[in-house]
């Protein structure tokens, strides 16, 4: 059985294994209410980004929840158009102001771009100043990580990537593990496509769990952090109720057989935004 609900990053910072994703959550009261609901249901990890356009509402939800700031792990990301040393520092300041926070727990480069190294220098400075407790990347493949690490003073602590049964990424997981980089899965439910997979339906019935719970548990048992998104309180509660069962080794392997390498999101090597 999974021993802990937190992942200890290589600098000692504890990151909850399950978070609440805010991608495509409508700005305004919808975001405020869903963040509040997640925190009230026991979630202690909120994943956001400047480009989502809802950080003011995310911050308001955290504030209204009444949960102490030090109990909530808050992630944000610098967008592609804000990469570069000075622009990254300014983007970080804006994110903190929008969230109404004095520090971030994790700041990520959202996508690999030519200015990664300059951006990373700014992030290293933010980390050294104590304004962010951990720094990392998102959507980085092995070659992106190798390029960044070759010039980095501080190694990335986290890589947030598209990860689900259809895109299991075992080689990238092994690479990150070798370099003490924690992995977070975005799109763990394949943006809804996972509900059409026959094996997942069968196994969900076998374990008397929902397909969402099964998919999230599968990620957790691989040592991967997940950030599912929902604006419905009962779905949020369901997503966080995955610590009372364990998928057998045999069924873990069966789910791994679903890996076709197909993405539901963009390929980091061919993005044009």
Image (cartoon, rainbow, N blue to C red):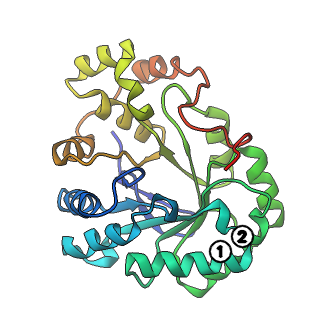
Residue tagged 2: 119
Q: Secondary structure at mark 2?
A: helix
Residue 235 percent coordinates (x, y): 21, 41
Figure check: 60 above or below 212: below
Q: How many marks?
A: 2
Q: Nearer the viewer, residue 83 or 11?
A: 83
For residue 220, say whether it is visible: yes
Numbered tag placed on residue 88 in the rendering: 1
Give the quarter of the image for residue 71: bottom left
How packed is label 2: few (under 14 Cα within 10 Å), some, or many (20 or more)?
many
Q: How far apart are the alpha carbons under marks 1 and 2? A: 6 Å
Q: Nearer the viewer, residue 272 or 21?
A: 272
Residue 45 percent coordinates (x, y): 36, 61
Residue 212 percent coordinates (x, y): 31, 33
Q: Secondary structure at mark 1?
A: helix
Q: Which residue is pictured at 29% across the width and 45% down the height?
A: 230
Q: Nearer the viewer, residue 239 or 48?
A: 48
Look at the numbered discs 1 and 2 and tell me whether their residues touch, using CB distance below 8 Å: yes
Give the quarter of the image for residue 239: top left
């Amino acid at each position: 059985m999974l021993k802990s609900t937190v992942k200890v990053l290589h600098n000692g910072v504890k990151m909850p294994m399950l978070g609440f994703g805010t991608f495509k959550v409508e700005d305004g009261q919808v975001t405020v209410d869903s963040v509040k609901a997640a925190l009230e249901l026991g979630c202690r990890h909120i994943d956001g980004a400047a480009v989502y356009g809802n950080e003011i509402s995310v911050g308001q939800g955290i504030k209204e929840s009444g949960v102490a700031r030090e109990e909530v792990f808050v992630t944000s990301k610098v967008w592609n158009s804000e990469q570069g040393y000075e622009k990254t520092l300014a983007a970080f300041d804006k994110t903190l102001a929008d969230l109404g926070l004095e520090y971030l727990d994790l700041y990520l480069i959202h996508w690999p771009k030519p200015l990664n190294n300059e951006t990373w220098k700014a992030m290293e400075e933010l980390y050294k100043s104590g304004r962010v407790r951990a720094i990392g990347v998102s959507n980085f493949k092995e070659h992106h990580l190798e390029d960044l690490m070759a010039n980095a003073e501080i190694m990335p602590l986290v890589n947030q990537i598209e990860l689900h049964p259809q895109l299991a990424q075992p080689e990238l997981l092994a690479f990150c593990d070798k370099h003490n980089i924690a992995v977070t899965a975005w799109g763990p439910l394949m943006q809804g496509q996972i509900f059409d997979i026959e094996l997942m339906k069968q196994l969900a019935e076998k374990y008397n769990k929902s397909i969402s719970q099964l998919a999230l548990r599968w990620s957790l048992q691989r040592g991967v952090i997940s950030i599912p998104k929902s604006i419905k309180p009962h779905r949020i509660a369901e997503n966080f109720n995955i610590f009372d069962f364990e998928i057998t080794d045999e069924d873990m392997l069966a789910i791994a057989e679903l890996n076709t390498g197909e993405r539901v999101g963009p390929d980091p090597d061919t993005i044009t935004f």
